[in-house]
Image (cartoon, rainbow, N blue to C red):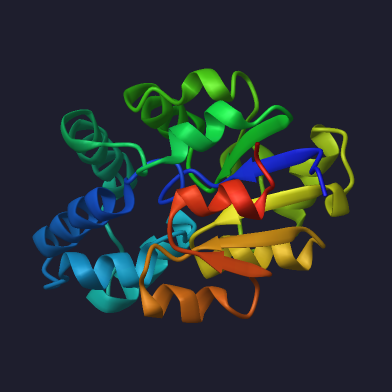
Amino acid sequence: MKWKLIIFDCDGVLVDSEVIASRVLAEQVVKLGYPMSPSEAIHRFAGIQMAKAIEIVEEKLGQPVPADFESTFRDASFKAFKKELQPVRGVDKVLDKLNGDVCVASNGPRNKIELNLNLTGLAEYFGDNIFSAYELKVWKPDPEFYLRVAKTMQVQPGECVVIEDTHFGAAAAFHAGIRVLGYAAGLDRKREELAPFAHQTFDNMSDLFSILDIE
């Protein structure tokens, strides 16, 4: 089937941002007195709504975080992205070959999405087809997130395919009636988490050539 719309998650699918962001978030949490490691941060927070992440941090600390916690984290992570961020290996070659409509849909704020796409040279593939949960006012794993994306792009859910790397995003798409391709990047844990929701998992972006029947 030739899909009318291919929807890409951003973090971990288009750009290798999750390790960077998780390290920065762990550093911010440590400053508040909880010894969180980067590996714990990525396990707990990858793909999650920021407000939910803050709730978890506050539970661990036993007290509220400072009012500027999110803005401080964003500033620090953006600085790290500018120094370190790279595109996911091979995703540009896939995007080069896609002829139909594509968009990017993320739980992150628009300025983060745009920054990361520009830093990695991927912005040209999406134009204005960028969807942020902060603007949609609904976050993954709520299926309404992807239903709104499909409606705005004027396609039916069954005419879309979503590429996700976390179970939060995969669950949102699955329950919206959209075919889910789970990017597991060779990690057994990630594959296990994606399995209940992904119609198919894959390890390398080059696998999409055959999965999506890209010529």
Q: In this view, does 61 lie above or below 108?
A: below
Q: Which residue is drawn at 44% across and 62% down?
A: 203
Q: Is residue 131 left or right of residue 29?
A: right
Number of labels in the image equals: 0
Q: Is residue 114 above or below residue 192?
A: above
Q: Position of residue 170 (x, y in %)?
A: 61, 64
Q: Position of residue 32 (x, y in %)?
A: 14, 62
Q: Which residue is drawn at 59% across and 25% down?
A: 126
- Front position in the image: 82 or 97: 97
Task: State the residue lying farthest toward the front.
Answer: 215
| Res 44 visible | yes
Q: Where is residue 3 in the image (x, y as percent from the top left)?
A: 79, 43
Q: In this view, does 117 lie above or below 214?
A: above
Q: In this view, does 82 lie to the left or right of 3?
A: left
Image quadrant in which the C terminus is located: top right
Q: Is residue 112 above or below residue 127?
A: below
Q: In this view, does 143 lie to the left or right of 7?
A: right
Q: Residue at x 43, y 55 (%)?
A: 204
Q: Which residue is drawn at 35% across and 43% down?
A: 89
- Front position in the image: 119 or 32: 119
Q: In this view, does 186 lie to the left or right of 205?
A: left
- Front position in the image: 136 or 128: 128
Q: Where is residue 85 in the image (x, y as percent from the top left)?
A: 25, 36
| Res 142 visible | no
